[in-house]
Image (cartoon, helix red, strand yellow):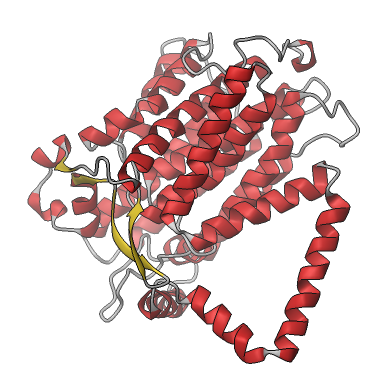
Amino acid sequence: MVDARQLDVSAPRFFPLAEFVSERPLRCVAWLFVLLPLWWALGLEQFVWPVGLLGIALFRYGAMGTLPKLVPVARWLGVFLVVHLISGFFIVENIRYITFARNISTYVSAFLLVVLITNEARSWEDVRGLVGALVLTMFWAGCIGAIAALGIWRPNFASAISWVTPDWILQTDYGETAAIRSVGDESWFFGIQFFRVNGLFLYSTMYAAALVVTIPVAAFAWSQARERIQRVLLGGVTLLLLLNLAGTTARMSIVGLLAGLTVYLSLYTRLRRPIAIALGGGVIVLVAATLVAPDWVDETASSLIYARGPNTVNSRSLVYAQTIQDFQQRPVFGWGTQRHVAGLPYGAGSHSYYLGVLYKQGAVGLLVFLAVWWCVWRDTRPPPTDSQAGDPSIRFLQIGRWVIVAALINALTEVLDLDATTSALLWWVLALLLATRLSLPSGFEGKRSG
């Protein structure tokens, strides 16, 4: 095991944008993601992750006759996959088996990412190479989103996969979205018409969810760069991703990003006291405004909530109410997948990660799901702040708190496994955090096997 503290972080090759890692399985993982624009153009980005990762894993462990070691997160993901399979026996709409297969494939990808990266990334050198690949992947997405937002290029074409996809699948909302390639659509926000970007992702909200877990990583890469050209390039990438997030107008994603940033700054920087004062002052101002001008506060809150019109909020409320009502009919293993209900604009079990798992996999699934995230939080914990504060691997773990908080808050109103690419990027980042914690010489090394 290489000691992360012995690495020269000021070397010119830190966070390379073209050179990734020396280990072949990790290099394959890196290229699998860097080629995202190609998969998107072909219409394969919803299917390539489990297939590609499984191929890498079979080559690494099957051909070599070795077995990977499973960290606790991987084990809990394995249990969740079993519960997921059991819930499939309770599907009532035949067409939903396609949705079920796609949904469970996102967790197969998550499992494989955790297994591959925690076993193959044996040092901080490997992790930082994959960080460079992640930044490059999102750079492509950010460029395409920015070009679309500026009106320079807004492609709309049928992907290659649409040529071989059965018509009955293309007639579904998901099938149509996957078959027709577009980078956004016209929308309204505060009464202003604009082009809302979704880039290389299925929906704008899914693009925003991917951005909130990768912007902190891009910011980390920028903070660690030592050469001026690297700092300029990585700073530009971070700003580009922030502008793309603004272009999605995904309010809960922005709230999650800011909340995660607040947690990070409060815990790991010298801004703890100013932030506490600012938050306390904000609460006092809000309370005073509510007492002095309640109508103004109510009007302002309503304008924020209904910025995209009343239909979105009302539709979500109906979906949440139906989700909770239907859950009571099958509380143990759920309905297997989202379900169409007459009168609902969206499927029951949608628009909330937590309620979605509760609806699809029942109470058993939700408990296992929470166990997965508890292990993620526990097994990516940074060492005490007074230990090697300047170590890049420890700083990356601290940034990880920003990522996890942002994702968990965003999950309140978005189903993060709806888009396979978003889910894959999320678990790529989480797997990197797990591998980083394992690489620290002072802890977690023994937990590779248990």
Q: Position of residue 15 (x, y in %)?
A: 58, 19
- Name the residue located 91 percent from the left edge and 33 percent from the top edge: 386
Q: Is residue 412 above or below residue 247?
A: below
Q: Is residue 341 above or below residue 116?
A: below
In the rendered structure, the answer to whether residue 157 lies left or right of residue 322 reads left
Residue 36 seen anywhere in this rendered image of the structure = yes
- Name the residue located 53 percent from the left edge and 20 percent from the top edge: 67
Q: Position of residue 316 (x, y in %)?
A: 42, 74
The C terminus: image quadrant: top right
Q: Is residue 21 above or below residue 370?
A: above
Q: Position of residue 66 (x, y in %)?
A: 52, 14
Q: Nearer the viewer, residue 70 or 405?
A: 405
- Image mark count: 0
Q: Nearer the viewer, residue 140 or 71?
A: 140
In the rendered structure, the answer to whether residue 331 lies left or right of residue 292 reads left
Q: Position of residue 278 (x, y in %)?
A: 80, 62
Which quarter of the picture shows residue 154? top left
Q: For the view shown, which residue lies furthest in the right direction?
A: 386
Which quarter of the picture shows residue 381? top right
- Name the residue located 41 percent from the left edge and 51 percent from the top edge: 206
Residue 107 seen anywhere in this rendered image of the structure = no
The N terminus: image quadrant: top right
